[in-house]
Image (cartoon, rainbow, N blue to C red):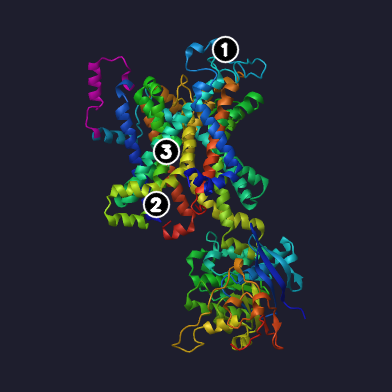
Amino acid sequence: MAHLLEVQDLVVKFGLRFGDLTAIDGASFTLEKKERMGLVGESGAGKSVTGFAIINLLSKPGYIADGRVLFEGRELNRLSEEEIRNIRGNRISMIFQDPMMTLNPVLTIGTQMVETVQAHRKMSKSDAMDLALDKLKKVYIPSPEKRLSQYPHECSGGMRQRIVIAIALLTNPSLIIADEPTTALDVTIQAGIMDLLVELCETEDMSMILITHDLAVVSQVTEKIAVMYAGKIVESGPTDDIIQAPRHPYTRGLIDALPGTRGSGSRLYQIPGMMPTLMDIPPGCAFHPRCSIRTQRCETETPLLVSVDDREHMVACHGLGGDV
Amino acid sequence: MLAFIIRRIIQSILVMLVISFVGFLIQHQIGDPVRDLVGERVTPAEREVIRDRLGLNDPFYEQYFRFVAKAVQGDLGLSFFYKKPALDVILSKAPATIELVIVTSFILIFVSIPVGIYSAIYPKSWISRIAIAGSTVGVAVPVFLTAIAFIYLFSVELNWLPSYGRGETVTVWGFWDTGFLTVDGLLHLILPAISLSSIMLPLFIRLIRAEMMEVLETEYIKYAWAKGLDRRRVWFVHAFKNTLLPVITVFGVQLGIMFAFTILTETVFQWQGMGFMFLEAVERSDTSLLVAYLVFVGVIFVLVNTVVDVIYGVVNPMVRITGAK
Amino acid sequence: MSTWARFKESYLFHSFKRDLIAIASFCALVFLIFIALSAPVVAPYNTYDTATIDIMDAEIPPSWMEDGEDRFLLGTDIQGRCLLSTMIYGLRVSFLIGCGAVVLQALIGILVGLFAGYFGGKVDGFLMRITDIQFSIPYLIVAIFTSAIFKLAFGVGRYEDLAIPLLIIIIAVSHWPIYARTVRAAVLGEKGKEYVEAARVIGLSRWVIMFRHILPNTMTSVLVISTIQVAEAIMSEAALSFLGLGMPITKPSLGSLIRAGFEYIFSGSWWITFFPGLLLVVFVLVILLLGDWLRDVLNPKLYKG
């Protein structure tokens, strides 16, 4: 059976004056219909770049150097500009991090919604407006008719993100890529937005890739996780497995760092050191300088993602989850 | 919003008062109203009488107030050379300059916008490179040289376009001599307008290009691409509207400046507009006319700036709601 | 190490050696300045000496053309003067006025900027209000108006006699705001630094701090805009002369030459306007290119010295 989305050995590079930097070094994962996946990692790990690479929207000087992205059987990275345009905003919708920056400040909400519809469907303006209203209601926006003629800055942060979600729904996409959808919002509304996204995935038959650094959110919302570090996926598998029995030292560190895992009153745990920048990625396993179970082998040989059980739990570590 | 407009208007009134003060100072120190009125052949005794009658021996501030009061009513003194009220002289020359500025603005808009946008979207194209190189070199070439070069090429060598004057004009509305209604008049407008626009073209092309490039890097443009919108829609609706706003402000200011630069262009083409009149006034030591021109142009400059600021406030939705900038 | 050796090691020099345009511009500039300043020696004829001018020699084309003569390389102008010589003298006038104007405007601008930046508060507000208002009007417009006023005040004759110093003053008065702004910004940047604090703690007077400590540190910014301002000054002078508000035809600058030659392009004597125009453009361009390079090099973000 064909996966909804399959990413095979994706390599993304940035072409700079003094040479090319590798931002993503061979990432692979799959996603099924109505499945929700979390792509987790720190800033700079490459998760947003992965999201953009899927719909081939990398900003210069980024480019896809190798690998394939298969969506509903079609190779997205080989499509022409016209063809990929039909996918973007149509079959795959994307939600960015800060709605204040993503909604065009000089156009009304109505305009920005109607244009999305009309870009992909033959519809009259009034029909498109009705569709927009319908979606606005689905995201529980109060007085949606008023919103259509308002400008983005007239709405609150949480409302703007709901509008962005509504825009994503307009074309009944099969996949939503949500890039840090709640990071820019107040803590008090974050939960509401996440709940809304989950609900919509259920009711609208959508899959979701949730790109975030927040393991806590991911543990509650997704069915599988891929953990990224310095451009590589270091661990992937079902959410429950990873949260309860993380194998990769980095993942373990992330979970330990969550407040609450160590009991109240104790010091917050921090993984020693920092994730390397694209220019200083160490040889071998990129995590080895910070790893407490590293060996000689880790300093020279890059570990590959291998299965550790029969449930698709995969880890890239020479120690394969030895005792910590 | 209203508060913003009122504040802006008060500001402009203050600046206009300063301009009037400078004008008055010049008139007071350098001008000779007696000579303007009765010429040079009067005895010193007669001069004193006339001076008294004109109020020239009154205290400084009294004279200033009178100056402003008269100016507000449209009396800017008498032109020595033309023997007519200065304002009348200026207004009779104004249509020539205004028409020149209008045509120049059209050229500016219809050249700089396409070139600017194109070179922002395709920065490595040869149009883009030529435009940038052209602006760099263009800064070193004074406008009167470009005008002369144009005249030499198109008038002397090719004989396609006329090289001086306004050509045939038609009087409309009883007083406005327009060159728009005759082919001859229009032909005469071409070279001067191109020369005048060459002063500002490098600036505008570079401005639009830079603004557009900046806008194209923003998150909301990236989002527009992610929504799968048509290229043209992204460029011309999303990007362009955001580029437009700062460009409008600059254009407004440059409009006022364009009026002043007509001094340079009109000389070369013997264009009977306000700029040419200004230089003639200097040559003829016609102080009143000079001061009148200064005040007139200064007021226009301030007015245009104010109008542009207000329009910007209206067009930019963020200012409209919050009243701030 | 000697100063010369240190200079050869510096980033400035290395960057210069690699940039072909900078080298070419620099050489061209040095050449032109040398020619201009040694005009009496270099020019074939002394164009100020009316005895050497014969009106019968008027409007002779450049020597390589049909009616040209060998003794007048670039031809003659409408009064019979050798065009090449007049251009060289004219270049000298333009250059002198340009430099003089920049020195004066720098003086004014630096003082204003220094006071505004260091004293702050009402002084700053007042000085900057004036600066900004004048800054919003293009240089040339201010220069034109100022020279018109001067011409009326002095009368045509006296104005022409005093043309060079008057033009220096006029151009300086029109262009100083940029120095004020630049220096003020630099002063604001320096004010917060420790050496200023230290100087105050020692008890040095305000004036000493301003002039002996802060001012030298603002010189980089001043240098960066100075080359461009020289080019601006030269162009402004050319424009003023072209309009008849600058150098008279008896002691012409490049601008006056262009003005004088303009009418004669219709009768075919194009060289009278063309060559002075060309010289002006080349001179200004060379200064601008060098200034651009200098600005890139002195940009604090890149400077590793």
Residue B180: mark: none
Query: Where does residue C75 sit, x and y in percent of width and height?
Result: 59, 18
Q: Is mark 3 on a helix, strand or loop?
A: helix
In which quadrant of the rendered view does residue A234 lie? bottom right
Q: What element carries label 2?
A: helix
Mark 2–mark 1 distance (CA, rounded to whole Å): 65 Å
Q: Is residue B64 above or below residue A174?
A: above
Q: Which residue in the structure is indicated by mark 1?
A: C57
Does the stretch in magenta take in B176? no
Q: Which residue in the structure is indicated by mark 2?
A: B5
Chain designation of label 2: B
Q: Give the range drawn in magenta.
A: B36-60
Whether residue A129 is visible: no
Q: What residue type is labelled 2?
A: Ile
Image marks 3 and 1: residues in contact by CB distance under 8 Å: no
Chain designation of label 1: C
